[in-house]
Image (tube, rainbow, N blue to C red):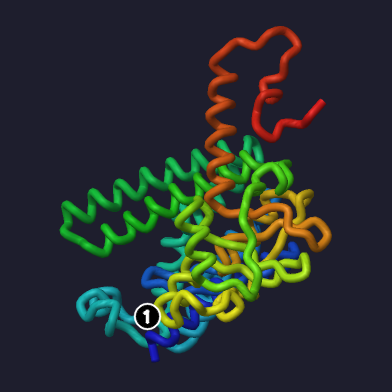
Amino acid sequence: MFILAVFAVVVLHELGHAIAARQYGIKTRDITLLPIGGVARLERIPEKPAQELVVAVAGPLVNVVIAAILFAGIMATGGFTPMGEFIREGPEVGGTFAERLFAVNVGLVLFNMIPAFPMDGGRVLRALLAMTTDYVDATNVAALIGQGIAFLFGAVGVLGQNPWLLFIALFVWIGAAAEASVAQMRAAIAGLPVRRAMIREFTTLAPTDTLRTAADHIVRGYQADFPVVEDGKVVGILTLQDLLSGLSSAGLDASVREFMRTDFQSATPREPLDRALSRLREGECPVMPVVDGERVVGLLTVENVGELVMIREAVRTRHEAVPKPLGESPTDALPGAPVR
């Protein structure tokens, strides 16, 4: 019952984030329970620092309210177990049910408010920094602080031979690096339309084609995922994974229609790239057809967007290093710069 209560508290914590995000029109995709807590996967990150601050503190605030209610109940029924007895018996069995649950909520607040991604404290720190500086710079500073804390956790874990602290250190380190990477990518593609990053040279398949045809295209070219077009309209996507599954189960002569997936999303050439990329990441299909009307004019993949970002950053670094002639903008030569 105590373990179930702890899981319930973690779920309520994540629901606090979800309810706060909903106030700003942000949906929650799902909530995942992990060994060290939970993660509410939001549809998108709040655009304004003040909004992110509210969403970040909403979870720990739920634990504060639960702890306050438990504290009032404990004090009304005779007070806490003496600390010596509590420590001697251990937090697993020491104290009453309510006292142990109170300790869990206090621990969740303290742990989640550590200023390190992906904990709530890291997002609170980033939101506060973003109120006075650039979002990417704020993320980088918060990520650097988080990785410093992860290093300390790791050092204490090694010296104290505590594998749990080592696990937390690895989790925080990876989370901080991932958050910084996502923020840099968002900044790099901000304001760009999908057409700047889409693949323009691609091969399409028909539903009546065989898997042999798709396999031949992969061997002869570079493309691994294919839009399936019927009567000029995209009706499916055949991914490399789908192709391999079909070849192993049905053979070369099976039709594309049998193994293509229809649970894909599409984008338009003028749609903001960051929004399309967010939808692409949230879906299960690794490629997104870009359609103009009903005609497919391109393909969008996470890998191609990443290549665009690397190219833009390389060009930006070059332009920052070389002095510009009078009147030339540093962004004129960047891929995706506006045409004049």
Answer yes or no: is residue 140 visible: yes
Picture quadrant where residue 233 is located: bottom right
Count the labels in the image: 1
The kind of secondary structure element at disc 1 is helix
Q: Residue at x 61, y 65 (%)?
A: 42
Residue 246 lies, with reference to residue 279, above or below; the image says below
- Image quadrant holding the N terminus, namely bottom left
Residue 335 at x, y = what percent? Answer: 65, 32
Judging depth in this view, the residue of 65 and 216 nearest the camera is 216
Answer yes or no: is residue 65 visible: no
Could you tell me the amino acid type at mark 1? Arg
- Image quadrant holding the C terminus, namely top right
Q: Residue at x 53, y 65 (%)?
A: 214
Residue 177 at x, y = what percent? Answer: 44, 47
Judging depth in this view, the residue of 258 and 83 nearest the camera is 258
Q: Residue at x 66, y 47 (%)?
A: 200
Q: Residue at x 63, y 75 (%)?
A: 208
Q: Which residue in the protein does label 1 denote? A: 100
Residue placed farthest to the top in the image? 326
Circle 1 residues within 10 Å: few <14, some 14–19, many ≥20: many
Residue 219 at x, y = what percent? Answer: 45, 56
Residue 89 lies, with reference to residue 300, above or below; the image says below
Q: Is residue 301 left or right of residue 71?
A: right
Judging depth in this view, the residue of 254 and 287 nearest the camera is 254
